[in-house]
């Protein structure tokens, strides 16, 4: 049979065990809240980085589109400048030939003058 002293001792031990378990429960609850906060922070950071990645992708796609739009105009200007350069070279060749012609005529006139 249980004596009042044994029952009192059992009650003290149970209360001690309950206090110990309550402390563990409090500690584990605090750990859980810390982990939940950390998880939430990581999830938010991940969402922000994914959004930034998507924004960067859109920005790059827009820049590529703008460059594709500009490219035909640049090609047209390039052809125009190349054509102008060709005309200038042809004009220069024509002027060089005219210069040679004038030089030959001048030399021929000088020879005629000396005679």
Image (cartoon, rainbow, N blue to C red):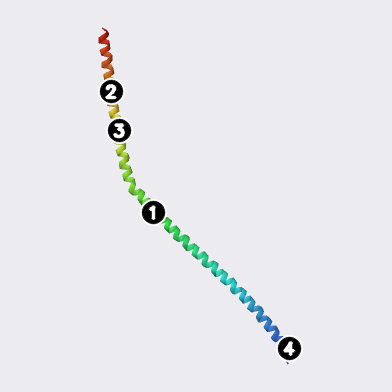
**Residue 51, placed above or below residue 13:** above
Pinpoint residue 106: horizontal percent, then vertical percent.
Answer: 27, 15
Pinpoint residue 22: horizontal percent, then vertical percent.
Answer: 63, 79
Residue at (52% x, 65% y) in the render: 41
Q: CA distance from mark 3 to mark 2?
A: 16 Å
Q: Earlier in the sequence, mark 1 or mark 3?
A: 1
Q: CA distance from mark 4 to mark 2?
A: 131 Å
Q: Earlier in the sequence, mark 1 or mark 4?
A: 4
Is residue 39 rendered to the left or right of residue 5?
A: left
Q: Which residue is mark 4?
A: 6
Pinpoint residue 33: horizontal percent, then vertical percent.
Answer: 56, 71
**Residue 1, placed above or below residue 81:** below
Task: Return the mark for residue 86.
Answer: 3
Q: Which residue is mark 1?
A: 61
Tag 1: Cα neighbours inside 10 Å, few (<14), some, or many (≥20)? Answer: few
Q: Earlier in the sequence, mark 4 or mark 2?
A: 4
Residue at (64% x, 77% y) in the render: 23
Q: CA distance from mark 4 to mark 3?
A: 116 Å
The part of the image, by quadrant, that contains residue 81 is: top left
């Amino acid at each position: 049979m249980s004596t009042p002293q044994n029952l009192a001792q059992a009650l003290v031990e149970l209360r001690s065990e309950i206090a110990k378990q309550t402390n563990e429960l409090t500690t584990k609850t605090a750990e859980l809240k810390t982990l939940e906060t950390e998880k939430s922070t990581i999830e938010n950071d991940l969402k922000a980085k994914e959004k930034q990645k998507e924004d960067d992708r859109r920005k790059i796609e827009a820049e590529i589109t703008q460059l594709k739009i500009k490219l035909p105009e640049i090609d047209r200007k390039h052809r125009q400048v190349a054509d102008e350069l060709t005309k200038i070279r042809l004009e220069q060749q024509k002027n060089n030939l005219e210069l040679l012609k004038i030089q030959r005529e001048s030399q021929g006139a000088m020879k005629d003058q000396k005679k």
